[in-house]
Amino acid sequence: MHRCDLGLIGWGTVGGGVTRILAQDGGLLRERCGLDLRLKTIVTRNPSRAREAPAAGAAVTDRLDAILADDAIRTVIHLVGGTAEATEICRACLNAGKNVVTANKAMLALHGDELFQLAADRGLCIAFEAAVAGGIPVIAALRDGLVANHIQAIYAILNGTCNYILSKMESEGRGYREALADAQRLGYAETDPTLDVDGTDTAHKLAILARIAFNGRIPFAAIRTEGIQSITFDDIRSAHTMGCRIKLLAVAQRRSNGLELRVAPTLVPVDHPLASVSANYNGIFIQGHAVGTTLLVGQGAGAMPTASAVLADVVDICTGRYQATANRFTFFTQASPVSLLPENEELTGSYARFLVPDRAGVLAGIATILSKHGVSLLSIHQAAPDREGQAIIEAVTHPHRGGSFLKAVEEIDHSALTVRPTVTLRRL
Amino acid sequence: MHRCDLGLIGWGTVGGGVTRILAQDGGLLRERCGLDLRLKTIVTRNPSRAREAPAAGAAVTDRLDAILADDAIRTVIHLVGGTAEATEICRACLNAGKNVVTANKAMLALHGDELFQLAADRGLCIAFEAAVAGGIPVIAALRDGLVANHIQAIYAILNGTCNYILSKMESEGRGYREALADAQRLGYAETDPTLDVDGTDTAHKLAILARIAFNGRIPFAAIRTEGIQSITFDDIRSAHTMGCRIKLLAVAQRRSNGLELRVAPTLVPVDHPLASVSANYNGIFIQGHAVGTTLLVGQGAGAMPTASAVLADVVDICTGRYQATANRFTFFTQASPVSLLPENEELTGSYARFLVPDRAGVLAGIATILSKHGVSLLSIHQAAPDREGQAIIEAVTHPHRGGSFLKAVEEIDHSALTVRPTVTLRRL
């Protein structure tokens, strides 16, 4: 039996899951892999929490030094949110000679270069399975299971809040605000849901996945990111008409001349495996040159699923496995950035909904401008005009250069062919 | 750069995938994880294959000793089919001091106890990601990613041949024989498909998954196994009427009094994630107490997907990670068998299709006998009688003891309530 003393910094939702598993299921890990995990110290802003939550035998304090100065603690579970303070605490742990297990995706997306290098310099490691897609072991799958693959594409639903809102809008015909309020009531969305709904959280996770898949630095600011705040029930209904669902999709797509990285609400055909990933679930669809396509689905957040991933990392470190990974895999400290394609070089299918006056020649006018910009149509259809004499034309394109489509739509809107600015979405 | 000399025994379909990746994509592994994998020697019954396939720089021979006696080769890729010879060769590799990477599920299901113990005694390891579900990294997910979970259930589609046949029967209205012939023509089924279609191959894989998930020996012969040979298009159509698809399902279900293990054609409701796993794909649905439900889907067979898993294992061994796993995880050499439930203690939903004479009281008679045996119905419906005056009654039950349902059906068939032996299937 190998004993490992652990520290925990940050005792919120996920920390509560970790202490619960360690308190109740420590025997499982002793039996399964011969590890005796002892949570020695918990550092939290609110030590009085110990009165309600099981601390798994740990001392509870608000002094960070109780962990940093304790040489018996070699591994720290870092569940601090935000970026600035979290990064500082992570640095302090590494400087104090401790391995770090973290669930903080923002910290790694923004400061991963520095932190991974610091860990490498000190002969330590940072494990982060819990930072992406909660309990789904996608970091390990991508890094180890698919190690012999050139990754061609990753399409992923990585934010349960957004997926819940979009699923609810579709299944119950609700507007965005109502569905968001519902998600907040159920605890699927924060009181301030900005980083979820504006796509930032998804972009953080995409940056981490892309770092591993494409083995290079990912300049976070270069990821084009759109959120779901302006999606309407009309969009959902239109998607349905086109045989699609709208998902907030993280996309990493290797092209011959570089990598496309983006986060955007996207029409996903209903027969695509990701279309069935609903409610607060996450799903990651990966294409590798050897493995073909694989899909991983599961709970992307929540106390227990995320704690499951945290403890998988703890076991990896306490068995010595993770050190072998961190010492060898180059994505941790890769100096060169991945080459990203500018937006006008991206290849993407698109959807547009034009609101047009009911007069002859409008459809032809639109088709002509699209064609002039080299955009080729997969389908186009026009509904009967409403009582105000306005009609909706919906078009879906084959994959094409993203920039040319947006230019074509701009020209259409400026040619008085439409009566309102045109709604556009990506299509998988 | 860390150089690893490898041997390959068995140069068939999967071996061809391995040599292809090593020949073409060795640079990927050098760059990604600093490993210089050198295939030094290939042992094959048919060395003349070297004229058509890239040998990745290896010497090709039919002498096993060329690998066994070569001390530079520390790790052997073992792609030998069957059981007796494969086991003997695996033993010989271990006795010669070599780690083994194998894709042979039958060997591990039947002789895993002996082989894992031998490996442990010699300080070596046997890696086997490729033995279950091809390219899907499910072994690692279950062993490492979900290590902190009490696994409550595994439901899995593990045989691409069967899944292809069942999908084809459904989508094209074909009979079993036609769909099988189709699968053979496309290379999805062997000339002798017995071990696939009778469920044995699925049971081998289930035994391996259950060994890891439930941390004990799995007596292979105790797995109740039914195949798909007697599934008719009528069954597929009936399933459709009940809102289900038929899948050959491997089931491991933890109950308070023991473990259910079985392989059987099973009605899966269309809204269950496994119902969408079609054609030659594999899917594994896992319930853990912390992670909730996760689903992994991908190519379960084929040269390149399986080679992807083989090379993941090779990397795990050459980085030293796998040794840390094999030294510590107890399922490899666990002495105690898992406690399996006898059939009459199993809890399972069931489906029955009764062919009955068109006379009053038959439905009541059937319902009475089912109820007498404690079987509670989820739904029952009777179609209008055909021209011969015979009617079909279809019933789906809530989960109940498996034995009591079969006894009830037997009593119904013996009570002259039916005109033909009743068709029964499991229901998820």
Image (spheres, coloured by chain):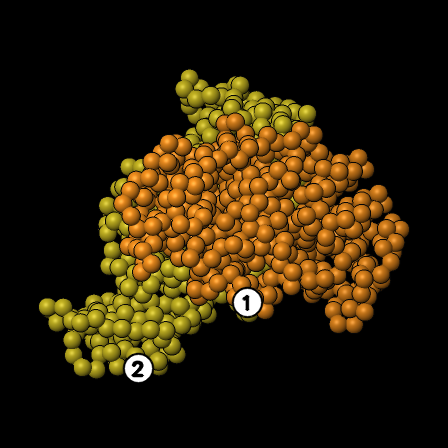
Chain colours: A yellow, B orange
Q: Give the camera-side residue of B45 and B317.
A: B45
The quarter holding residue B64 reads: bottom right
**Residue B367: which quarter of the image?**
top left
Task: Report x, y in % for residue B127.
Answer: 70, 45
Residue at image point 38% right, 77% down: A376
Q: Residue furthest top?
A: A51
Q: Which residue is mark 2?
A: A368
Q: Secondary structure at mark 1?
A: helix
- Helix, strand or loop under label 2: helix
Residue placed at 42% from the left, 17% from the top?
Answer: A51
The amino acid sitting under disc 2 is: Thr
Protein chain holding label 2: A
| Residue at 36%, 34% in the rendered image | B371
Q: Callout 1 environment at 10 Å: few (<14), some (14 to 19), or many (20+)?
A: some
Label placed on residue B182: 1
Q: Residues within 10 Å of mark 2 (few under 14, many from 20)?
A: some
Question: Would residue B290 be seen by someone viewing this image from the given angle?
Answer: no
